[in-house]
């Protein structure tokens, strides 16, 4: 079997050595070279033609963001970013994702992580997954997101706050619309979430719960970034808060997101029980909680791009216990067609949509 050729880019000789050692332990991978900065990386990509690049964000001469932009423009190659968990690191990570990076890995501690072994398997898994990605799709998505950003209009905070003063789903007619939107996604998810959430109207008559596989320290920055772009309100979920319509709640990294009825209201419960299939937050855990707690609600579920099968078992439980309209992202627009494919394989998906059509379908199901 042909080996996956990898270029490792980091300004730290120690980090380069460590990452190279991790990757060469896997028989599927071959490290064809390393580079100490973005400028060096671009030169070596052109000569070595790697299948995947691991790229540090913070480097001298040419940093990872500058290098990524040139890579995607001049020599498109799937890129896995290595990022620090600082607020600035998280923000730079989302810029990288917008600019075409396949995915990112959070360094456990600082720029030079002596404990990088903690994410060794994640590095290997994401490099292998990146090698299967359609780099032209990554390139195309990056261009589309940049164009969409210029057209995004954020409603004023005053308007938004007025719309959510009442409890979670009270309509103007004074009755509760018992509908809730549940979104699960992983690799490629930040781009997909931006496409979907920016196209939901402020008037949507349901709350939205989101599980995006992401480590602690990144989900708050993701929520703030999306909130600045969307008509709806987007925030990182907080334990015990009451759920409001027209608001999207993103599960914090490291916590499962569940719901609980409190009288006529719904509250978010965050907890740290064992990861499910390696994930915390887990889409399955969120789906199962809603299935058990909100039997009388109509659930609109969305499973988008991501590795693995998280969400498929939860979807089975949701369909078994109540009324559900289920949407899966199409293979055509998924960066990784793992989670949507697993959901489709349950034969419980009502519609398969390209990512740009998902918001319209959510609204249709919310209004029906």
Image (tube, rainbow, N blue to C red):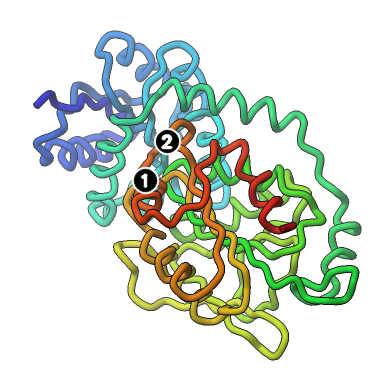
Residue 33 visible, this orientation: yes
Alpha-carbon span between mark 2 and mark 1: 8 Å
Tell whether 15 sits left or right of 217.
Answer: left
State the residue lying farthest toward the top: 47
CB under 8 Å between discs 2 and 1: yes
Q: Secondary structure at mark 1?
A: helix
Residue 214 visible, this orientation: no
Residue corresponding to mark 1? 341
State the residue lying farthest toward the bottom: 263
In the displayed structure, would residue 229 be above or below residue 233? above
| Nearest to N terminus: mark 2 or mark 1 | 2
Residue at image coords 54%, 28%? 141
Which of the numbered marks, if any, corresponds to residue 355? none
Q: Secondary structure at mark 2?
A: loop
Tell whether 207 sits left or right of 82.
Answer: right
Give the quarter of the image for residue 76.
top left
Give the quarter of the image for residue 233.
bottom right
Which of these two is toward me, 261 or 114?
A: 261
Report x, y in % for residue 292: 49, 80
* Quadrant in which the N terminus is drawn: top left
In the displayed structure, would residue 26 be above or below residue 119? above
Residue at image coords 66%, 80%? 266
Report x, y in % for residue 349: 46, 53
Residue corresponding to mark 2? 331
Report x, y in % for residue 14: 25, 39
Residue at image coords 28%, 49%? 122
Neighbours of disc 2 within 10 Å: few (<14), some (14-19), many (20+): some
Give the quarter of the image for residue 282.
bottom left
Residue at image coords 71%, 64%? 206
* Quadrant in which the C terminus is drawn: bottom right
Which of these two is toward me, 130 or 19?
A: 130
């Amino acid at each position: 079997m042909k080996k996956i050729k990898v270029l490792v880019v980091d300004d730290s000789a120690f980090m380069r050595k460590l990452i190279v050692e991790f990757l060469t332990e896997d028989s599927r991978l071959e490290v064809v070279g390393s580079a100490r900065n973005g400028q060096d990386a671009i030169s070596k990509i052109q000569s070595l033609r790697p299948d995947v690049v691991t790229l540090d964000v913070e480097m001298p001469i040419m940093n990872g963001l500058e290098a990524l932009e040139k890579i995607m423009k001049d020599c498109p190659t799937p890129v896995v970013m290595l990022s620090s968990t600082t607020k600035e690191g998280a923000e730079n990570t989302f810029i990288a994702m917008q600019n075409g990076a396949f995915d990112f890995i959070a360094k456990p501690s600082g720029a030079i992580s002596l404990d990088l072994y903690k994410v060794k398997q994640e590095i290997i898994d994401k490099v292998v997954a990146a090698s299967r990605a359609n780099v032209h799709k990554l390139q195309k998505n990056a261009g589309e997101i940049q164009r969409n950003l210029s057209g995004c209009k954020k409603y004023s905070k005053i308007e938004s706050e007025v719309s959510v003063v009442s409890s979670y789903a009270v309509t103007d007619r004074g009755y509760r619309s018992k509908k809730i939107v549940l979104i699960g996604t992983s690799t490629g998810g930040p781009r997909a979430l931006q496409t979907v959430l920016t196209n939901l109207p402020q008037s949507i008559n349901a709350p939205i719960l989101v599980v995006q596989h992401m480590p602690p320290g990144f989900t708050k920055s993701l929520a703030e970034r999306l909130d600045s772009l969307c008509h709806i309100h987007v925030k990182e979920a907080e334990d015990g808060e009451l759920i409001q319509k027209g608001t999207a709640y993103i599960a914090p990294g490291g916590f499962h997101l569940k719901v609980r009825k409190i009288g006529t209201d719904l509250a978010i419960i965050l907890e740290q029980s064992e990861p499910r299939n390696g994930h915390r937050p887990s889409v399955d855990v969120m789906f199962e909680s809603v299935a058990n707690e909100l039997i009388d609600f109509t659930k609109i579920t969305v499973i988008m791009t991501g590795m693995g099968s998280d969400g498929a078992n939860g979807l089975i439980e949701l369909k078994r216990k109540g009324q559900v309209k289920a949407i899966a992202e199409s293979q055509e627009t998924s960066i990784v067609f793992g989670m949507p494919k697993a959901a489709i394989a349950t034969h419980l998906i009502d519609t398969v949509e390209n990512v740009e059509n998902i918001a319209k379908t959510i609204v249709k199901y919310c209004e029906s």
